[in-house]
Image (tube, rainbow, N blue to C red):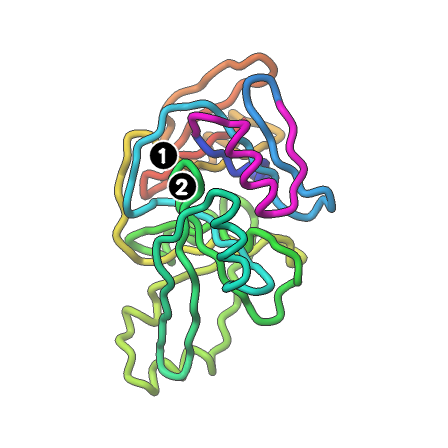
Amino acid sequence: MLRLEHITFSCDDPARLAEFWGRLLDYETAAAGESWVATDPGGEGIRLLFNRMAKSQTIELPIHVDVNVPDREAELTRILKLGGHLVATKTHRMGDFETTWTVMRDPEKNGFCIETLENAPPQRHISNVTFACAEPRELGRFWANALGWPDEDMDAGFLQQFRDARVDERQVTSFHLVRQPEGRRPRFLFQRREKSRPEFYPIHLDFGTDDREAEIERLTSAGASVVETKVGTNITFTVMRDPEGNPFCVG
């Protein structure tokens, strides 16, 4: 199985972007050669890696992160002072269900969302890696199989509220969640929405495995494709794309 190692940002100034995300999430930052990393000192949150790499500017982001915060409105003010940019605050309603989130961009225009979730840990954390996709359930099943993660159970009564409110069935199936075992974070959220297909993705995911070649064979048989294999200073890794074309690395 794959192990999620990093969320990787392609950037022009790795040190500056690491500083922003470190302060946003209360992470510690450090140089790693020409790259920078931001790490949760508590050992719970996902590690972030910042590489000086080419990226395409996009409006509809193929992959972004959702950050849970204790107080969304207060956090918005804090993030603006750190160098973030406000895009819009949105509210989504389906039947009696309502949720509000704020779309933002970091200093290099990478998009992310902040929200305050009920029953979530009080500390700031990345709650979701969110994929914009055409078929949420199919892509979610690919990643659940790749990672050995279970689907997030959706309460049948909760979904029935949408149907009782005569919400279109396609909206009811417009999202899918897979989660790490034992409730670790982040989850992977798949949402049916338009996305751009940039040449160079601003954000991608890096995975570790005990047998890279065997894992590549397993993933390609499940619908992934190989782009290229690269040899770095300390690691050999293969760049791949999932069934909807999102890039990821296996090392």
- 121 left or right of 142 in image: right
Mark 1: which amino acid?
Answer: Tyr
Residue matched to label 1: 201
Q: Is residue 28 above or below residue 138?
A: above
- Residues in magenta? 11-31
Residue 195: horizontal and vertical position, in percent? 28, 47
Residue 50: horizontal and vertical position, in percent? 52, 30
Q: CA distance from mark 2 to mark 1?
A: 10 Å
Mark 2: which amino acid?
Answer: Asn
Residue 5: horizontal and vertical position, in percent? 59, 36
Q: Residue at x 54, y 45 (%)?
A: 147
Asked if residue 56 lies in the magenta stretch, the reply is no
Name the foreground residue: 232 vs 68. Answer: 68
Q: Is residue 26 above or below residue 28?
A: below
Query: Can you name the residue that lies furthest to the bottom here?
Result: 164
Specify whether residue 219 is in view. yes
Quadrant for residue 176, please give it.
bottom left
Q: Residue at x 66, y 62 (%)?
A: 122
Q: Residue at x 55, y 23 (%)?
A: 35
Mark 2: which secondary structure? Answer: loop
Residue 159: horizontal and vertical position, in percent? 42, 78
Residue matched to label 2: 110
Mark 1: which secondary structure? Answer: loop
- 21 left or right of 112 in image: right
Residues tagged 2 and 1 counted as in contact (Cβ below 8 A): no
Quadrant for residue 109, please give it.
top left
